[in-house]
Image (cartoon, grey):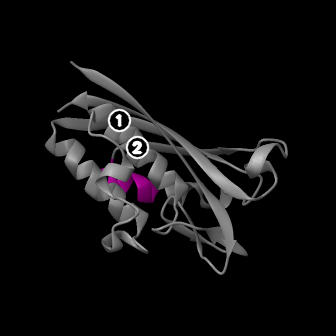
Amino acid sequence: MTYRVGIGVDAHALADGVPLVLGGVRLDHPRGLAGHSDGDVLAHALIDALLGAAGLGDIGALFPSGDERFRGAVSIELLRAAYGQVRDAGWRLVNADCVLVGEEPRIAAHRDEMRRRLSEAVDGGEVNVRATTTDQLGFTGRGEGLAAHAVALLERA
């Protein structure tokens, strides 16, 4: 069997008046993530990890921020479309691990729903979601934004 690993990273600034969406789940939070789409850093990092593992470029090439078709896009749907290309290229997800980086919000109460929504978007592939802080260091530590990292393992379908 042939396996491939990809890594994805994404970050967005927090902004007033924007809903916060993480892992496809809308959270009750005073600020959301500014972006061309809904700014879901977990979904974006996973997209890049999948595309990287499959050798299919990156999220910016597939869904350019200058393209008005993607303004306000639901990132879970972008993930579904990206995974369709990964699958069409002959790969399937073995598992993925996604890490949210930031002081707030706490995601423990939403983690299972995030896992479920991300997993559904990749045809039921195993997706883990967890979080960490930076102990007030950097832009995530100061509450200016959130970041996410993801690793995906693919196998030849």
CB of mark 1 within 8 Å of CB of mark 2?
yes
Is there any visible trace of residue 115 in the rendered image?
Answer: no
Question: What residue type is disc 1 on?
Answer: Gly
Few, some or many C-alpha atoms within 10 Å of disc 2 (few <14, some 14-19, many ≥20)? many
The disc at residue 131 is none
| Residue 112 sits above or below residue 6 on the image | below
Residue 26 percent coordinates (x, y): 56, 71
| Residue 33 sits above or below residue 50 on the image | below
* Residue with the most extreme right position: 136
What residue did someone put label 1 on?
52
Give the side of residue 137 with respect to residue 21, left or right. right
| Part of the protein shown in magenta | 115-124
For the point 38% across and 65% down, which residue is it? 66
On whether residue 118 falls in the magenta region, the answer is yes
Occupied quadrant, residue 134: top right
Label 1, secondary structure: give it: helix
